[in-house]
């Protein structure tokens, strides 16, 4: 199983609630409307919660998407639909300079 983990901050001037609403109500439907998104096996979005004894979070959201293979992941992220319909929308709610990503092979230690 291959997983991509993306962390990012919201676009400047956007409240956290506006960011969450936009991602859920506008961006997610764009992504899941393209046929290549069917290659995603699991998709999770995490938002930080208040944790007073820990440092401030580096990101406003972390997205995890699982794929059966690196090829399946590439089929999504490098397809014409993603490049022309989904990717351009990121600038509407994400600070693009803040994006961090890790492509990983997930090994479950405790389930």
Image (spheres, grey):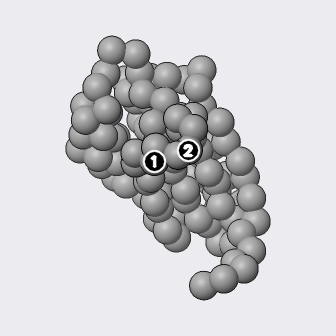
Quadrant of res 91:
top left
Q: Is residue 92 left or right of residue 108?
A: left
Q: Which of 90 and 50 is in front in this view?
A: 50
- Circle 1 is placed at which residue position? 51
- Circle 2 is placed at which residue position? 54
**Residue at image location 72% in from the left, 52% down from the top:** 103
Quadrant of res 3:
bottom right
**76 shown above or below 106:** above
C-alpha separation, residue under disc 1 versus residue under disc 2: 6 Å
**How many neighbours does mark 2 have within 10 angstroms: few (below 14), some (14-19), or many (20 or more)?**
few
**Residue at image location 49% in from the left, 30% down from the top:** 9
**How many neighbours does mark 1 have within 10 angstroms: few (below 14), some (14-19), or many (20 or more)?**
few
**Residue at image location 25% in from the left, 35% down from the top:** 17
Residue 8 is labelled as none
Q: Are marks 1 and 2 in contact (CB under 8 Å)?
A: yes
Q: Which of 105 and 15 is in front in this view?
A: 15
**Residue at image location 42% in from the left, 28% down from the top:** 10
**Residue 19 spot, x, y in % from top left:** 32, 33
SS label for mark 1 = loop
> Which quadrant is the N terminus positioned in?
bottom right
**110 shown above or below 6:** below
Q: Can residue 31 be seen in this view?
A: no
Which residue is farthest front? Answer: 53
Q: In this view, does 107 lie to the left or right of 45?
A: right
> Which quadrant is the C terminus positioned in?
bottom right
**Residue 109 spot, x, y in % from top left:** 72, 80
Q: Is residue 50 visible?
A: yes
**Residue 52 spot, x, y in % from top left:** 46, 43
Q: In this view, does 14 lie to the left or right of 37?
A: left
């Amino acid at each position: 199983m291959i997983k991509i983990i993306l962390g990012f901050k919201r676009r400047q001037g956007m409240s956290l609630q506006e960011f969450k609403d936009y991602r859920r109500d506008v961006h997610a439907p764009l992504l899941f409307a393209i046929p290549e998104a069917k290659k995603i096996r699991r998709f999770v979005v995490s938002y930080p919660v208040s944790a007073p004894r820990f440092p401030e979070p580096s990101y406003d959201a972390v997205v995890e998407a699982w794929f059966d293979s690196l090829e399946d992941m590439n089929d999504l992220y490098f397809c014409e639909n993603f490049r022309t319909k989904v990717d351009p929308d990121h600038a509407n709610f994400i600070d693009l300079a803040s994006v961090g990503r890790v492509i990983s092979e997930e090994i479950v230690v405790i389930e």
